[in-house]
Image: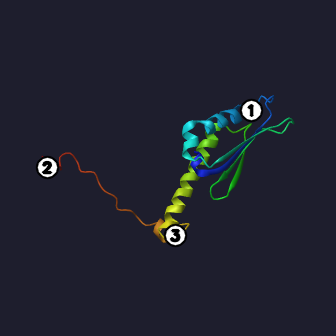
């Protein structure tokens, strides 16, 4: 998960009962496997003393920053969103390295073309 990120900032008040998502996400970021996937990723923890709701801010390697409300978003959902966006970034990078334009634009007429597909052979048609 961290391999797609350059920075993670987790903010919460330790006395706030809504911190479960922040603490779980922090544990995932501190896992050995996550740290090994991107040792350069900065992990910041800000312990607040006010009533500001817990939040997680991630900065992707391309500079895009996303802020998640940790009171209503489970850590696993945040992790899944990061992985999905990361796969998108990897795909974009592959196309750019291959010299292809990004995003790939499929002409409207090609979207509506029929696809012949393949037909499975019936058991009786197969030669034995």
Q: Answer with the quarter of the image where residue 52 lies.
A: top right
Q: Are marks 3 and 1 in contact (CB under 8 Å)?
A: no
Horizontal relation, residue 127 to residue 31: left or right: left
Q: Examine the rendered structure and indicate whether residue 121 appears above or below residue 45.
A: below
Q: Residue at x 67, y 36 (%)?
A: 26
In front: 61, or 82? 61
Structural distance between the alpha carbons of marks 3 and 1: 47 Å
Could you say where residue 32 lies in the image, as x and y percent from the top left?
56, 37
Q: Which mark is residue 108?
A: 3
Crowdedness of circle 3 by 10 Å Cα count: few (<14), some, many (20+)?
few
Task: Return the disc, 3 or 1, that comes first in the chain's sequence.
Answer: 1
Structural distance between the alpha carbons of marks 2 and 1: 64 Å
In this rendering, the label closer to the viewer, 3 or 1 = 1
Q: Answer with the quarter of the image where residue 28 lies.
A: top right
Q: Residue at x 51, y 59 (%)?
A: 91
Q: Quadrant of the N terminus?
A: top right
Q: Examine the rendered structure and indicate whether residue 123 appears above or below residue 17.
A: below
Looking at the picture, the colour scheme in use is: rainbow
């Amino acid at each position: 998960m961290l391999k797609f990120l350059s920075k993670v900032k987790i903010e919460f008040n330790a006395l706030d009962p809504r911190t479960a998502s922040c603490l779980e996400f922090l544990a995932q970021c501190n896992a050995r496997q996550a740290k090994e996937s991107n040792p350069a990723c900065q992990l910041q923890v800000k312990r607040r003393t006010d009533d500001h709701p817990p939040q997680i801010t991630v900065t992707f390697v391309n500079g895009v920053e996303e802020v998640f409300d940790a009171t209503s978003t489970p850590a696993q959902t945040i992790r899944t969103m990061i992985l999905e966006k990361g796969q998108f970034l990897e795909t974009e990078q592959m196309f750019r390295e291959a010299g292809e334009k990004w995003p790939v634009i499929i002409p409207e007429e090609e979207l509506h073309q029929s696809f012949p597909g393949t037909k499975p052979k019936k058991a009786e048609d197969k030669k034995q």
